[in-house]
Image (spheres, rainbow, N blue to C red):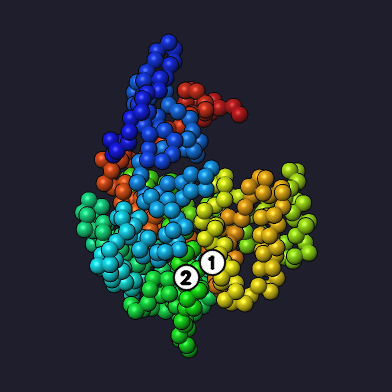
Amino acid sequence: MISDLNKSGTVTFTRDGKSVDFPVYTATHGPAVFDIRSLYKKTGAFTFDPGFTSTASCESKITFIDGDEGILLYRGYPIDQLAENSDFLEVAYLLLNGELPDRETRDRFDNSITMHTMVHEQLKNFYSGFRRDAHPMAIMVGVVGALSAFYHDSTDINDPKQRLIATHRMIAKMPTIAAMAYKYSIGQAFVFPRNDLDYTSNFMRMCFAVGAEDYECDKVLCDALDKIFILHMDHEQNASTSTVRLAGSSGANPFACIAAGIASLWGPAHGGANEAALNMLEEIGSVDRIPEFIERAKDKNDSFRLMGFGHRVYKNYDPRAKVMRKACHDVLDALGVREEPLLQVAMELERIALEDEYFVEKKLYPNIDFYSGITLRALGFPTDMFTVLFALARTVGWIAQWSEMIVDPDQKIGRPRQIYTGEAKRDYIPLDKRRL
């Protein structure tokens, strides 16, 4: 796939008086890359890049981010246009296939996903093996990892048909598995999916319907959750996506790879940001305490940080936050819950962050995690379900990235190098001669 890049010159590496040239390529968007795959062979040296923040681990056509300009593209389409005009399954098709579907193709895709939403009856037994107070993400890691034991007819990664079936199964069953994790955590009976509902409405019903009465999702609420799903679908080579690719590079089946991605996403530095933002609001507690915490946030010597403001990647306004802000306010208005103390704190913090010179100058704008946490809280989801919903949405991106990797002729099993700083080579000392 490297042939899809444009060669734009060379870069010269000089060591011990010996110079070696390496190709430089330019991409559709973004910085140039130095092709150093032959670096060790030609020079006997490696590069050192903890966290791989300056290393392109793959070539991809799926997602592009320009953090300085606040740009996020899915297959070339700006994220705000997709979130405002598409729905979850249409964007899922786009990520998987590279183009938006026509009507007939879209109907076939929707129908295929719908027909796979049920899970194997015996899968329900897995849930009863967990404690009732188990974190839903712990349940997700276990249950998704077990899918290959139930659907082993779609684990041959070398068969395109099986890869397609596994892809549709993962996207279709993830809402069912996530809703079952939620129901189990609150001690309620599982609710089966319904084929006459759209993807997001079906998920909401599986979460909030009970045996005594059914649940009909309000359009404003379902639209907001659908936008959350779209905005979280993919985000380049983040920790969990890289984990999925790394696991997949060994030839592991797609269900195992997605389970690995879920485990990585569970980390509080990755998928737990919106939960952390909500925990911060609860710590502040009331509007009258906001000035105190604002001053603490400005104090370099204070360990307190405002969660949900600014972004590691986006040095400008998070483009997803623009969409999420409107959806968040629509939900609060539809539910009439603006007077809830925690949400009052959130709205006042938002106002300060958008007006205060300190935050504006440092571009510490409210990010998607700030708005999505508030929205999910208003929709009725407990904080320990936030990362589960993130995993549900990100499954599409993980599967798209995994599928792209499988057919990449340049793909190799992941094998990062290291700088060894341990003891130099030494001889073994018999036990009776050792002295500490």
Residue at 52 percent across and 28 percent down: it is: 422
Nearer to us in this view, 353 or 191: 353
Amino acid type of the residue that numbered disc 1 sits on in the rendered structure: Ala
Amino acid type of the residue that numbered disc 2 sits on in the rendered structure: Asp
Q: Which residue was labeled with disc 1?
A: 327
Residue 252 lies, in percent from the top left, at 32, 50
How far is mark 2 from mark 1, CA to CA?
8 Å
Residue 278, by quadrant, is bottom right
Marks 2 and 1, the one that precedes in the sequence: 2
Asked if the residue under mark 1 is in contact with the one under mark 2, i.e. CB atoms within 8 Å, the reply is yes
Considering the numbered disc 1 on the image, is that residue within a helix, a strand or a loop? helix
As drawn, is 366 to the left or to the right of 164?
right
Residue at 67 percent across and 49 percent down: it is: 360
Residue 271 lies, in percent from the top left, at 52, 55
Residue at 57 percent across and 47 percent down: it is: 316
Nearer to us in this view, 160 or 433: 160
Residue 146 visible, this angle: no
Residue 416 lies, in percent from the top left, at 41, 36
Residue at 54 percent across and 25 percent down: it is: 433
Residue 106, by quadrant, is bottom left
Residue 142 lies, in percent from the top left, at 42, 62
Q: Residue 223 carries which label?
A: 2
As drawn, is 105 to the left or to the right of 139?
left
